[in-house]
Amino acid sequence: MSTVDEIEAAVSKLSRQELSAFRTWFSEFDAAAWDKQFEADVAAGHLDALADEAIRDLREGRCTDL
């Protein structure tokens, strides 16, 4: 049995309260992991081209208020 299978089995046995607590924990865990990856991508310059394009669009008046 794989770790994922074990986790799925364990989650399926949680009570409603435990499942709610798990959802909250996992949401926060997942958001922190996403933030860490985003920060690593920014530091590595992976988003520079997108930022440059957005700044260029702003300067050239291609941005509108919503």
Image (cartoon, rainbow, N blue to C red):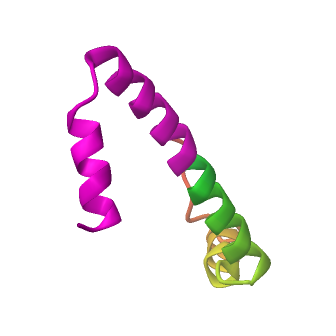
16 or 43, which lies in front? 16
Give the mark count: 0
Q: Position of residue 33 (x, y in %)?
A: 59, 57
Q: Is residue 37 magenta?
A: no
* 16 over 29 or under it: above or below: above
Quadrant of res 54: bottom right
The one nearer the camera, 19 or 27, is 19
Residue 6 spot, x, y in % from top left: 28, 54
Q: In this orientation, which residue lies closer to the viewer: 61 or 37?
A: 37
Place of residue 22 in the rendered image (x, y in percent of width and height, measured from the top left): 42, 32
Q: Residue at x 33, y 26 (%)?
A: 19
Q: Residue at x 25, y 49 (%)?
A: 8
Residue at 47% x, 41% y is 26
Left or right: residue 20 compared with residue 64: left
Most frequent secondary structure within the magenta stretch: helix
48 relative position to 65: left or right: right
| Residue in the image at 34% along x and 63% along y | 3
Task: Please give the range of residues in magenta.
Answer: 1-30
Q: Residue furthest right?
A: 43
Q: Quadrant of the N terminus?
A: bottom left
* Residue 9 higher or lower than 19, as above or below: below
Residue 32 sits above or below residue 36 on the image: above
Q: Find residue 36 and report its image quarter.
A: bottom right
Q: Does residue 28 show up magenta in the picture?
A: yes
